[in-house]
Image: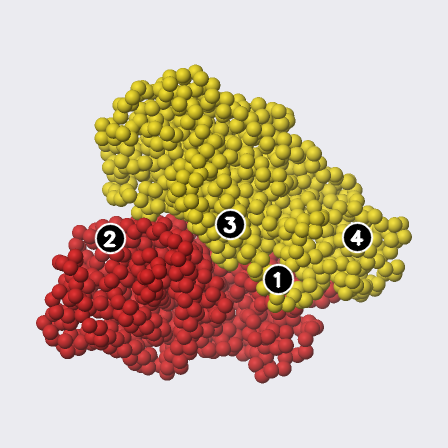
Chain colours: A red, B yellow
Amino acid sequence: MAMATKENGLGGAESSTSTPVATPMATPVSTRSVKWEKDVQEAAGTLDRPLLHKRCANTTSQMAVVGANTCPIESLDYEVVENEVYNQDWRSRGKLQIFQYQVLKWTLALIVGLVVALVGFFNNIAVENIAGFKLLLTSNLMLHNRYMAAFVVYISCNTMLAAAAAALCAYIAPAAAGSGIPEVKAYLNGIDAHSILAPSTLLVKIFGSVLGVSAGFVLGKEGPMVHTGACVASLLAQGGSRKYGLTWNWIRYFKNDLDRRDLITCGAAAGVAAAFRAPVGGVLFALEEVTSWWRSSLLWRTFSTTAVVAMVLRGLISYCRGGHCGLFGKGGLIMFDLSSRQATYTATDLGAVMLLGILGGLLGALFNYLVDRILHIYNLLNEKGPRSKIILTITISVITSCCTFGLPWLTSCTPCPPELAGKCPTIGRSGNFKSFQCPAGHYNALASLFFNTNDDAIRNLFSAGTDREFGVSTLLTFFTTVYTLGILTYGVAVPSGLFIPVILAGASFGRLLGSLLGSISGLDTGLFALLGAASLLGGTMRMTVSVCVILLELTNDLHLLPLIMLVLLIAKTLADCFNKGVYEQMVRMKGLPYLEVHAEPCMRSLVAGDVVSGPLITFSSVERVGAIVDTLRHTGHNGFPVIEDQPFAPAPELCGLVLRSHLLVLLQGRIFTRRCVTTGATEVFRTLAPFDFAKAGSGKGLKVDDLDLTEEEMDMYVDLHPITNRSPYTVVENMSLAKAAVLFRGLGLRHMCVVPRTQGRPPVVGILTRHDFMPQYIRGLYPNTMPR
Amino acid sequence: MAMATKENGLGGAESSTSTPVATPMATPVSTRSVKWEKDVQEAAGTLDRPLLHKRCANTTSQMAVVGANTCPIESLDYEVVENEVYNQDWRSRGKLQIFQYQVLKWTLALIVGLVVALVGFFNNIAVENIAGFKLLLTSNLMLHNRYMAAFVVYISCNTMLAAAAAALCAYIAPAAAGSGIPEVKAYLNGIDAHSILAPSTLLVKIFGSVLGVSAGFVLGKEGPMVHTGACVASLLAQGGSRKYGLTWNWIRYFKNDLDRRDLITCGAAAGVAAAFRAPVGGVLFALEEVTSWWRSSLLWRTFSTTAVVAMVLRGLISYCRGGHCGLFGKGGLIMFDLSSRQATYTATDLGAVMLLGILGGLLGALFNYLVDRILHIYNLLNEKGPRSKIILTITISVITSCCTFGLPWLTSCTPCPPELAGKCPTIGRSGNFKSFQCPAGHYNALASLFFNTNDDAIRNLFSAGTDREFGVSTLLTFFTTVYTLGILTYGVAVPSGLFIPVILAGASFGRLLGSLLGSISGLDTGLFALLGAASLLGGTMRMTVSVCVILLELTNDLHLLPLIMLVLLIAKTLADCFNKGVYEQMVRMKGLPYLEVHAEPCMRSLVAGDVVSGPLITFSSVERVGAIVDTLRHTGHNGFPVIEDQPFAPAPELCGLVLRSHLLVLLQGRIFTRRCVTTGATEVFRTLAPFDFAKAGSGKGLKVDDLDLTEEEMDMYVDLHPITNRSPYTVVENMSLAKAAVLFRGLGLRHMCVVPRTQGRPPVVGILTRHDFMPQYIRGLYPNTMPR
């Protein structure tokens, strides 16, 4: 796994490091570290490393990166590259252009909100109709006592839907499988994993999610919605296609990682807002869980995006209330409206709630551990190819169908409470009292939970004033099944969110505890269900403020706030003692080179110079074309220091940093001279527009093989001054590595130059990139300093 | 004003800058810039600049810094000073110490929550009792038709309360006047203005706020609560008094700016949570408005603090509901419970709401402009001394009393609605229908608003189903009066929050518009009042998410969310076209050297070397004691580069940075040698404990005059290696100034070393500090580059 970040071509190989400085430790000893060092040599040396897209396309999202040495990961650069070209372009911008930029920024954010709301709504309607149709069909057969036929219809519907979802994921967009939140989190940390935000991923995510949820899996649409939002934002930020002339010139202001990151943050927030219909919760979720950087102005823009989502959804839902949307069910903007219930509680109640928090924290930590184990097993299966993925998915689907259809037979029928005559058993597809196999006037409690969409099951569990509806054995069976199926389902090749399984399991567990403690606590069991959901969410996701606000927005009762807070605090604190949050765990498992907020303590005892190694590749400020092309061809590096030397400077000095992409554009423009002279930015603009230097979308942009230069041109010179970033961030080689990491993450850098401490040395001694701060890498170099 | 940051002794003078590098612009030309340059010379040169505390103590908070060249402002250092002493101390920490540190961090955060909740509750009870007693007394006299006596009692109560509040502020703690939010905002940005968080300020803030609110001023307790929370947190973070032995040894882990900042952030959030009883809103307020830095883990701790506040308040309020708290009024944890109202709205309603947003934005921008003007006038008056402050306060109090008592006489009495028999006119101190001078069965609508506490007036304005209670003329009179009084009151020498005046004015304005648009919009006028408050808050404070959440927590109706969002978006966007938010405006007016998120665009065309000037003062790594003492005595600098030279290095190189405070401690410890040799950290620990180097509270710590060294000692040598921060953040001199500013603010630095680009120069060419990034300073140096 330690190799993942390094061997993937660009992720690690973008650095070019050199001039080993005196290290405080002995040279590397373990096999691992030797391997690492070899990689560094390769990356900085002579190997051409083709991007193995093909292999990637055949692995699922879970597998795309895990342990794989195949998929390209590129780092993102959130620094503004202030070279002459940029500065000249920037200075030439009039008030109109700045206004255009502002308008564009806001328009795009609002469009993201609109599109995500529409997608979320489409998802909702599609699921309610498909699943509703399936459930109605089965229920009708059950009413006529044709149980076997009902089972066959039910299981074959589910299997077909599951197989379709799995086929989409396996063959078209493996990256669409799973939650998507870990990938979005990694992207916003600065890691561009292959095809994570591609159009095909978006389409498969939308339709796969609909099929997966309809197939009756224990999974949700929330994580996929976050991923969908991020994909929509990413596509919009690409600004159309230059190839087909479908683009605006002024969208170039937006073609950089920084603005894209901001828009993708808005998209992720919009996804949560659409999934839970929780606009404030969406903003907080993005802030607490997804992003690594935050600015106050972003809060404001994200908030506008989620406001659009809330308003569009509200409009569409009131349209659907008119009966225009087929089987579209209950639930306005607030999905589970509990506001009628007034919570007053005593000290005993608080004790019960605390117990709930403790148990939720323990169950949550166990959940994370088991998900991690299961994913490792599934990854081995999924690696065998698309067919094995589909078989795995179908197996889990069959198990799920058998559980949901079979388990209700184990419970005896309950007579309807007399005060609910007319409402029990429920007719139609949703509702609290499913008759299932029971005679008239009776209902099957377990079927009311299993034989429903997940949203309706949650609504039933949260419902107030129904203390006696679900017995202890019913709740225990349901909880056990859902908890197990939630863990088993997550790794299959369908878009699958974790929120709904966790809420389902938490709610049934809470209600179970509420029923057991009924004699000592006067709280409603529906309220216990809500608090149980909060505790399990706190125990698995380890989010606090956002989960709290999302639950409040779902249930619309602010009086519950102190209780929810208490439960979350206890569950998170306790679970943190055992393992990490589920998303962090997955980011780590996928081998994504995620930069943590806090540097590892052991990095304090190392300095920046300790981790740079390998020969450093630099360019002169006016360089021979052939030398550049050769270097680009034979390394995967993305940034090169530029050295100002004679005749332009009396002694070598650091001029700045050039990017591979800019070099390629400049070479393509053929602004060459026969002699070694400077030409300046004006000359560049005669051939190239600033737009040409804008960053292309992921996987796009010029390649070195696209250049078609003659032998004569290869012997000419090119002036790198106009494209050199004159202000790269630098650290002195004896800077504490921990502090260098703080700087690197804090400013969202991709490259950081290491300058010498003493005089009489080359003006730059190495470059630090993301992988140099990875604990695995450092551990390889200094196994004694960095304990596992 | 440009001088404020510079002449105040430490704020600007902590830099020591030198070796002017080639600048792209001509040398300074204007008088202003010449003056600036002179300051720099002085600061870096020979002048001893005593700290003029005395003058400071005689000016109000508004004046403490504005235009004044008298008050010390110190920068804070959020960087971990990783010198040998720190590292040795850190390495020696066992698991127990790390656990102690974690426990301490959480305990302090929770204690802050507890204390702030108690203070907030005390404030509430005190105000309700004092103001309630006053209103009851007056009402009784009115009932017996003794109008003149009532007026005399009313006005003299108000005047006495106002005079007491003003006297406290003017004589004891001038820093307690005003809102306090700008100061806390500045502190968290890294500016430690004199006595902002002192114990005297805390006491005056608490009691002054109670007196001020009770005096019937149009001001709130919200801003003061934020300041109070920050003061409480700051005092706790001081960790007791070493002087009286009241301290723990292990609290030293907490004695640094970084941990204090985190705790003060919790305190500020707790203040908002206590004032509005809005825990989530408190966290968001801290995040959106107050802090300049944020980490995910801080979200979690802040949230726990506000959770404690919510729970303690809930407990206390239910205790008070039992009638144990005197005249304590209505309002549970949700202050204005509107949850009974269901909002359904049409397109016309949306139009009306948008109009409200537009007008709110315009009124808000006007409010900010007028507050700014008024504060400038008040500052001139306040500068004349405490007596003039008290006179100003009394004048405004008398005007307020005359308005609130006099204006109700202008309206005719309204007959009570027949369906409210028994409830109208209201008996007792609060309620909707005040009889005032009216005969039985009638009420005075204007008195129902004016002759009440501000909280009750807001509750009346927000109340639903009372469309005809307040007429258009009543609302117009009330709005005009409150809007004007709000502006006039802010600058007086009492602790005064801006939230309540803005909510009052906004609510009356919204209700007014609602009454006017009654024919075309079917929305409740109470809802219009709420939206009006939102629009004016958006127009003045320019906060979005936090105001939205606070209003939701105040009113407990999430259905209103889309409407509140829309109004806020429109109001903020529009108002931003005219001026800045009221708190930013005040920070700027007070001349606090606040670092903005975005560097001024013109800073892009300058480089770091352009702003360093004056002779740089450096120390050798083993320096003569006399040289250090002389330098400390004759400069106000706080950071000095340390140069490693022969015999310790072959050529001069940058060893690191020492802080004044550490130098003083080391000198005090008398770890001297007769010859120029290194001694190392172990030697230091023989005499000094790590705790000795912990940062003392604001204004405390050793002074250079406290050192009592003999002539002989002055000729000895001291080894600076153990206290030198070996990893100061550095920039190369040709680094873009804008990017240097991003680095400086992003990492919360106090000093940043500028290293040369070319070889053969001294290893450090200057130090950048906060004031070098101030637009005024740069404008002084380069008047042509930086337009006003």
Q: Residue B449: x, y in percent?
A: 37, 28
C-alpha gap between disc 4 and disc 2:
73 Å
Circles 3 and 4 on the same subunit: yes
Decide which of A778, B54 is in the foreground and name it: B54
Q: Name the residue under label 3.
A: B113
Q: What element carries label 3?
A: helix
Tell me if A587 is positioned left or right of B698 in this view. left
Q: Please tell me which of labels 2 and 1 falls first in the chain.
A: 2
C-alpha gap between disc 3 and disc 4:
38 Å
Q: Is mark 4 on a helix, strand or loop?
A: helix
Question: What mark, if any, has residue B193 been given in the picture?
Answer: none
C-alpha gap between disc 1 and disc 3:
32 Å
Q: Mark 4 points at which residue?
A: B668
Decide which of A303, B18 is in the foreground and name it: A303
Q: Residues within 10 Å of mark 4 (few under 14, many from 20)?
A: some
Q: Name the residue under label 2.
A: A317
C-alpha gap between disc 2 and disc 1:
51 Å
Tag 3: amino acid: Gly
Q: Is mark 2 on a helix, strand or loop?
A: helix
Q: Is mark 1 on a helix, strand or loop?
A: helix
Quarter assignment of residue B203: top right
Circles 4 and 2 on the same subunit: no
